[in-house]
Image: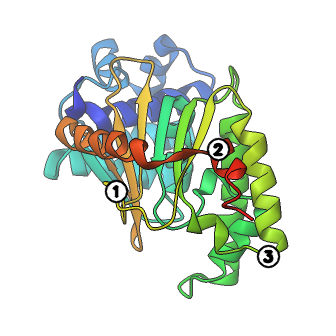
Amino acid sequence: MANEKFLQRELARTLIKYRELKGLSKDEAIWFLGTSKDILNSYESGKLQFVEPAIIASWLADYGAPQAVVDDAKAKAKWIRQGNPSNWQESAPEGFAQFTEIELLAATIDIYEAAYVTGILQTFAYAAAVLATNPNLTDEQRRTALSFRMQRQVAVFERPGGPPRMRVILPEDALTIFKGTEIYDEQLAHLTKLNRLAQVEIFIVPSGQIHASRGRSYEIMAFVDEKDPEVVYQEDIFGGRYEAKQGRVVQCRKLFSATLPVVLRYEEWRASDADQ
């Protein structure tokens, strides 16, 4: 796969999305933008190696895209010219919407979460408790982040055609840290419900296990369209980072595969009375 085209493909999807929201066909857009068929096709195909930031920004503005979308796309176009087009750093929470759009296109998602239940599987109460520990968030930012997590779950699990194939590995203490509280019981019930979905497999790493993924949280996404490279998404205190360089994606897949031998399936973990 052409991993160097990661950002180009993202920009192409954004252009197509807002052209269609404007109600324009390709032929109508050519006239509307004052461009040529070849130029429009080169941008919407995602195959143009170096896109012009000014053109991207101008077209999206003409389509009526929100200023935040225009600014984000322009920044990505500049990154393609000046940085490494196989990765991208976004700041939270502005990057959340873009992350959700990418997730909705995924055919498979593999997640290892090092500290907590991963966001897409959290209950409202669990998410609220985790977000409350972050002193860098204002009350408004916490409400925004909490709302996003709930909306993200609906978007992924209720998307047309069903959710992607998901394998999620969680550390045991991500759950047992809340043992003895209503948060714990509610979160277990929620995971039990999700684990019954045909597309979802949840695994638990028993406490005290040394394994390849320990201390590293990451999400690996693969897509139906062969033109789309596999992508790794990671978060740190400064925001979210996408990585589509094939060698680095392979490294993360090796970590995930090397972790699977030490896990218990969620139902096995529950049956082992480890949660009691």
Mark 1 secondary-structure assignment: loop
N-term-proximal mark, 2 vs 1? 1
- Which percent across, then down, holds residue 24? 57, 20
Q: Report if residue 22 is visible in the image.
A: no
- Which percent across, then down, holds residue 88? 30, 51
Q: Name the residue carrying label 1.
A: 211
Residue located 72% across and 31% down the image: 197
Marks 3/1: CA–CA distance: 28 Å
Is 215 left or right of 51, judged from the image as shown? right
How packed mark 2 is, by other alpha carbons closer than 10 Å (few <14, some 14-19, many 20 or more), is few
Q: Which mark is residue 94?
A: none
Where on the picture, by quarter, is residue 49?
A: top left
Residue located 76% across and 59% down the image: 187
Q: Report if residue 58 is visible in the image.
A: yes
- Which percent across, then down, holds residue 23? 63, 23
Proximity of marks 3 and 1: CB atoms separated by less than 8 Å:
no
Three-letter residue code for mark 2: Glu
Three-letter residue code for mark 3: Gly
Is 123 left or right of 68, judged from the image as shown? right
Q: Which mark is residue 268?
A: 2
